[in-house]
Image: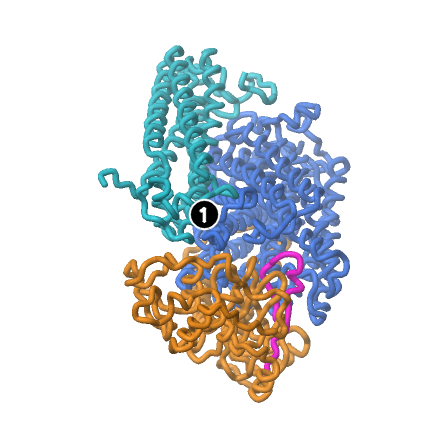
Amino acid sequence: MGISPVLWQFLVKWLHASALFPAEASTISPYTDALYFFLLLMTIVGLILVGVLIFGFSIRYRRERSPVATQIEGSTLLEATWTIIPLAIFLVTFVWGALLYFRIYDPPANAMNIYVVGKQWMWKAEHPGGQHEINALHVPMGRPVQLTMISQDVFHSFSIPDFRVKREVIPGRYTTVWFEATTPGTYHIFCTQYCGTQHSGMIGEVTVLSPDDYQRWIQQSTSGMSLAQNGERLFASMGCNACHSGNAAARGPNLAGVYGSKLTLTNGSQVLVNDAYLRDAILSPSQHITAGYAPIMPTYQGQISEDGLIDLVEYIKNLQSNFRVQQTLMTSESNQAAPTTPTEGTTSETVKP
Amino acid sequence: MDNVIATHPHTHETAVPAEHEHVVLPQHRHHFETEEQQREAGSFGMWLFLLTEIMFFGGMFFAYLLYRNWYYPAFTVASNQLNVPEGAANTAILITSGFFMALGVWAAEVRKKGLLVVMLILTTVFGVAFLGVKADEYHEKYEKHHIPGSSFSTAMFTNPAAYGLKEEPLAPDMAEHTQIFFFLYFAMTGMHALHMIIGIVILFWLTWRAHRGEFSAGYVAPIENFGLYWHFVDIVWLFLFPLLYLINRHPLK
Amino acid sequence: MSTSVPTLHTIVSLPDQSTATLPKKHYINNEHGLLSWLLTGDHKRIAMLYLISITFFFFIGGAFAGLIRLELLTPQSDLVAADTYNKFFTMHGIIMIFLFLVPSVPATLGNFLIPIMLGAKDLAFPKINLLSWYLYLIGGTLTLAALVLGGVDTGWTFTTPLSTHYLNTHVLTAATAIFIAGFSSIFTGLNFIVTIHRMRAPGMTWFRMPLFVWSNYAASILMVLGTPVLAIAIVLVALERLIGIGVFDPAKGGDPLLFQHLFWFYSHPAVYIMILPGMGVISEVISTFSRKRVFGYTAVAFSSVAIALFGFFVWAHHMFIMGVSNYSALVFSLLTMLVAVPSAIKIFNWAFTLQKGSITFETPMLYAFGFMGLFTIGGLTGVFLGSLGMDIHLTETYFIVAHFHFVMVGGMLMAFLAGIHFWWPKMTGRMYPESLSKLAAVVTFIGFNLTFLPQFILGYLGMPRRYAAYPPEYQVLNVLSTAGATVLGVGYMLPLLYLGWSLKYGAIAGNNPWQATGLEWQIQSPPLTENFIETPIVDYEAYDYEWLEKKQREEVTTVG
């Protein structure tokens, strides 16, 4: 970064100890701080420049020392100078900021995924292994973590200042953010988009654990069913397996391995099958018909909560073969309800139906 | 008297340079140097106001653009529910009304009071006719449960055959989006109708004043400027009609 | 420095105010009675009516600010319930933005001065001007109604779906209030544009107009083109609340982001509506108290129009993390950097106006210096926010709060006070007490910095905005901020007191106490109702101090 790492660490740690600066707890933090210090420098230099001009001219040309003013029209050279130099500095800021933006919002391919559902006024984190947390998030250090987030009601915004990441959490579509925590400890989670009465209460803590501690935590807090297992149950109980059975003559396309592939729709367009696509396809299927299939899939809008959708998405993501789909088809046709599982750490709200 | 607001008592010792070429009209406002300046300012002001109206309607056109792009099937089917003969009739009525208004402006300029009054009355009549047809259309929507809100029904779109319609049935989730089309229909034509109602009220007022001879002695600015407003309302309809009624009509099919 | 060679002085001796007398007839005593004020068409009287109204609303908005800062003294939400706090910041925002900042300079100083600066007798449409004031009052009354009926807690940004489906407070009342106040703004802008285009005196070309007129012109373009979009956004929110269609509701296929686009399409230009007229004031003040033409007049004039133009193309920088596409984010970030440049140009032009001038430090000049420093900070922190990656960390925190208070309060409000002090002698015929006003300016400056500098730090630490409660480690900075707010409040009370006092007891001002150029300073203080006895013919440039000095040499030197 051009500055001695020792000096940098000293500055940042000293500021942090004085409660004037947030901790640098993720791999992104130093990059954000670097841009920040550049901008601070720009501001201080700009302020000093303007201050020197104002005070300098005021003192030198105050009335007592300068009784006669000289009428000056202007100077094209000066105009050009103070147009081009600020523009150049701002453009540097633009480029730097854009690069940082992509660094923050483009997750690495090997990021582990955690789902976050925001609702008035709490955060629910759902690990793929089935661990559920309210207003808390346990993550391992040294591994990239991606959060796939959605709101159940109004706009919220998920912010971890010490990681320098933040993303709006909106109803109707997934938003994502990723980070890689570097230091064990606990850090604030805030909701930063005003969302009603308890907006200031929608806070939590992210706990960064060493890899071993994280493994231990995973084992301790599992609630029995992973998200995908829950999703499998829903897939059967909501009747998805009837059409998406994986048979050659099935009414619906085969979903095994579909995640991550490129799909051609009936209108000829090509889409990438990601989380957002899966969710949209469940809620408004008529706009997401795979080529070669009839538009007969009913919509599940209003019949399934965001938690349920996450379970289904996670299930389909991991679906590699239709073996168990066929099995559950036979089970569901025999009217046996799947066992419900007591889930640790969730509210009294159950997944519909 | 249109000078409702008490201004300072004006005596001609203050600055109205004598304009020997023009008669100083009684409606001359004394902060203007010349009649010409007053007329130009009034006209400019009306154009600016119409610009704000364009921005106002623009927001709804933007929403229309967005949702039509996303939910084209719903928009086409919903649009087919609108009554084209009535819409076309309304278009003709409004254009005719605009024609009469333009004749009225001319009549004012050539100082023909009788003709002016007749033109204004005709403009008003056709304007009211437009609103009458609109009311009929809204009523029809009410009967078919196409007014957005709690009474909205998508039955006609998910199962058109049962209603004798030759449409493709829409999937239920797409059928829900017809409500957005109808919302935009009511919002845009409703806002348009509101502007027409305001225009008609002003027309009544102007007709009465015209009858008293206020606009046939050289002072034509209110008629001209109202004409601008009326033509603008007309033009908005000319955009609304094809966008709302004619999305995907195939009369020869 | 002998008087026999007057050309050696740019400042001729200030008029001897002890011999000055108030003119016998002026716009205030021209007619008597309440109705003559309430039904006036005189732009100066309307300006005074506006001044009284916006001052009233300013102090209400300020009271809410005080309550906010009081709650934030402690980390817990202990002074008032969270709902009440939410209503505080909502009302503070709505009142300060729509009922104070947007009309402040245009509706008071602009209304008063623009016709006079152009050599006209009034604005183009005096009745519409009066209507504009009544619409403002109706909007203000409805806002107070919303307050009295229980308040509204949507935040001034009315974010959907919170405002459409999740709140039971008086959203419709507040929305209607803003809708109506918006028309007040549109009519003011419309009036200005027509007046500036059509009613300039003979010889007053575009490039002879004072820069104050240029900036109000630019702001008027924004008012006229931007405000209607806010109007439609509010109408759609109201309709969604009333009949429940889902134009912004994702469950029904709508998109809440549509509201964001419509809302910010106005609300970003709105900030330029607020700041541009203030910048016009600064041009006048710096020029007068340096006795010099503004450096780079053309550049400053064009930069106002450039800000207005570019200002329409940057709205989505309020939405960078909300799910706009990456492509969109890049475009808006780049445009945001471009819109920052004209403001920088102005600051430097003003600074260089000081060079080779003959500078005095009256109160308006002190406020102008305060403006320049604080606006530099505020504007540059805007660049922080326009930079995409930086915005991710800073958005929705107290950094934003600090940024906009620096530009709006440190910038705009200081410019407003500068203007009020500068033209007070012209509008009322009286001088205010100089030492007290200087004290108020300094107190305001100190109080302001103490209030808002800590908020930058809080923002980077991550403290979110609109929080009634916060983690305890943020308390020290919050306490500092509240302490500053107390000082700031004192600083704002002082002008109310001494300006009011000066109406009866202030020294008589005379025509041109500052020896400034500009048509308004050539007429009596307070002016006649019709402004000019005869239409001025303008054959000199703006800020022509040599012309002024020549004119004074040729005139009798008694005042009044």
Position of B83 compared to C533: left or right? left
Quarter residue C238 falls in: top right
Q: Is residue A196 magenta?
A: yes
- Secondary element at tag 1: helix
Q: Which residue appears at 46% of the width and 67% of the height? A: A93
Marker count (numbered) = 1
- Chain colored orange: A
In the rendered image of the structure, the colour used to display chain B is: cyan
Residue under label 1, please give it.
C305
Q: Chain of mark 1?
A: C
Q: Which residue appears at 73% of the width and 61% of the height? A: C77
Q: Is residue C120 magenta?
A: no
Q: Which residue appears at 42% of the width and 71% of the height? A: A329
Quarter residue A182 falls in: bottom right
Looking at the rendering, the stretch of residues picked out in magenta corresponds to A189-209
Q: Which is nearer the eye, A101 or B241?
A: B241
Q: Which is nearer the eye, B155 or B140?
A: B155
